[in-house]
Image (cartoon, rainbow, N blue to C red):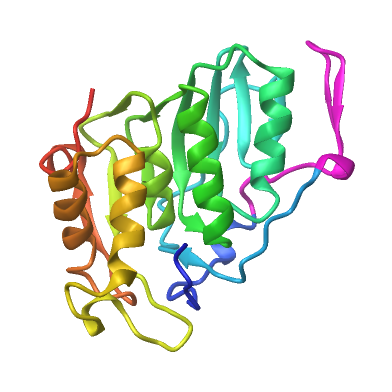
Amino acid sequence: MRRLLTSLFLAVAAFAAVPVAAQTTTIEVEEYVYDDADAEVLTSGTERFVADQFGDASPSVKPLASFGPFHMVSPDRAELIGSIESETPAQFRALLRAFPGIRQIDMVECPGTGDDEANLALARMVRSAGIATYVPDGGSVRSGGVELFLAGAKRSAAPTAEFAVHSWRDEDGYEADDFAADDPVHQEYIAFYRDMGLSDTEARSFYAMTNTAPHDDALYLNSRDLARYVRLD
């Protein structure tokens, strides 16, 4: 959808310590093994990050199992720590098979995505499964991660939750403001937000707000700020 060719404008090395998918994860609860054979990799060659992580992020308890950035801290709740990559939709599909009772994703630390098409595919999976999204106290969701947050069947956030948004940039270096307001390129984004449950008015208002910050910058919001544009539960 977003044909972006972006660069990380802040170093992503801070994420090297964040748990990412083990190549093989054994799920004792369900006696299920996820490995690379499950992967149906989506690749778009796009990245959208705001990579200024605050502190170290790790699961609150020892996970029952981990699927890429998703860590199952109980049979019905996952904690998301890390970015969304090409393989993440397949990892999430494996999670759904192993833990069909999942009801909520706590978005602890999500800087964005290394593959925007995969991120949007994952968002639609979350929406279709009726899973709630929640940003806990001190949680941070940025760039493409905000769109994943919008996918929640119910969306909620602690008062101290942080969100960061910015404009998209295409492969030619053009950003949203470089196109006329009625250019069809904008309709792709607005349609996605409507699919995530926003009204047409909300979708247009939210989209316009995200584009007030240039791609190489970010607009930071708390949960009260975000609630001006998106209904929170």
Front position in the image: 23 or 122: 122
Regarding residue 167, the answer to whether it shows in the image is: no
Residue that extends furthest to the bottom in the rendered view of this protein: 172
Q: Total marks drawn?
A: 0
Instruction: Check residue 56 for magenta coloring.
Output: no
Q: Residue at x 29, y 43 (%)?
A: 194
Front position in the image: 99 or 208: 208
Front position in the image: 125 or 182: 182
Q: Residue at x 57, y 37 (%)?
A: 58
Q: Residue at x 51, y 46 (%)?
A: 56
- Tell me where residue 39 sits by quadrant: top right
Query: Percent from the top left, x then y, of residue 81?
Result: 54, 41
Instruction: Check residue 19 for magenta coloring.
Output: yes
In the displayed structure, does residue 162 sit left or right of residue 33?
left
Query: Percent from the top left, x then y, of residue 27?
Result: 81, 20
Front position in the image: 141 or 87: 87
Question: Does 9 sit above or below residue 78?
Answer: below
Give the magenta-colored segment's residue range.
Answer: 17-38
Query: Percent from the top left, x then y, of residue 180?
Result: 19, 80
Regarding residue 224, the answer to whether it shows in the image is: yes
Query: Percent from the top left, x then y, of residue 59?
Result: 57, 31
